[in-house]
Image: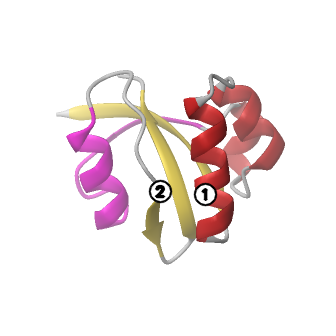
Amino acid sequence: MQVKARHILVQTLNEAVEVHNKLQEGQDFSQLAAKVSKCPSGRNGGDLGFFQRGQMVQAFEDATYNLDVGGTSSPIQTQFGYHIIQRTG
């Protein structure tokens, strides 16, 4: 089974909490990703396209698969930093 997601990557937990709060206040995910994400996908609103199990680091993958379509995660830490993930498909 494949999922589709986008994410915002930041370096610190404080940044991740700030981003998460802005999303909870209604800021647009894609625009925020383009503005603050440290991942090259930020240029595309954080879009990572479709992926399946085994393609992403475990914590990221587990968080994405546990979200409902349209759901947004709390900050998730990986070796790359802190992610806010939104499952889009």
Give neighbour class at mark 1: few <14, some 14-19, many 20+ (Cα, 10 Å).
many
> With respect to residue 64, does 59 lie above or below?
below
Q: Which residue is mark 2?
A: 75
Q: Position of residue 18 (x, y in %)?
A: 67, 52
Q: Name the N-terminal-most of marks 1 and 2.
A: 1
The residue drawn where x is 32% and y is 44% is 64
Distance (Cα) linking label 1 and label 2: 6 Å
The residue drawn where x is 63% and y is 22% is 26
SS state under label 1: helix
Q: Position of residue 11 (x, y in %)?
A: 67, 70
The residue drawn where x is 51% and y is 48% is 84
Q: Which residues are magenta?
A: 47-67
Q: Is residue 48 left or right of residue 22?
A: left
61 or 76: nearer the eye?
76
Residue ranking furthest to the right:
35
Q: Position of residue 45 (x, y in %)?
A: 68, 31
Q: Which amino acid type corresponds to the residue marked 2 in the rendered image? A: Pro
SS state under label 2: loop
Q: Position of residue 6 (x, y in %)?
A: 52, 36
Q: Is residue 53 left or right of residue 59?
A: left
> Does residue 53 belong to the magenta stretch?
yes
> Does residue 46 belong to the magenta stretch?
no
- Cβ–Cβ below 8 Å for labels 1 and 2? yes
Quadrant housing residue 24: top right
Q: Which numbered disc covers residue 88?
A: none
Q: Quadrant of the N terminus?
A: top left
Quadrant housing residue 34: top right
Give neighbour class at mark 2: few <14, some 14-19, many 20+ (Cα, 10 Å).
many
The residue drawn where x is 63% and y is 29% is 29
Q: Which amino acid type corresponds to the residue marked 1 in the rendered image? A: Ala
> With respect to residue 2, does 15 lie above or below?
below
Q: Which numbered disc covers residue 16?
A: 1
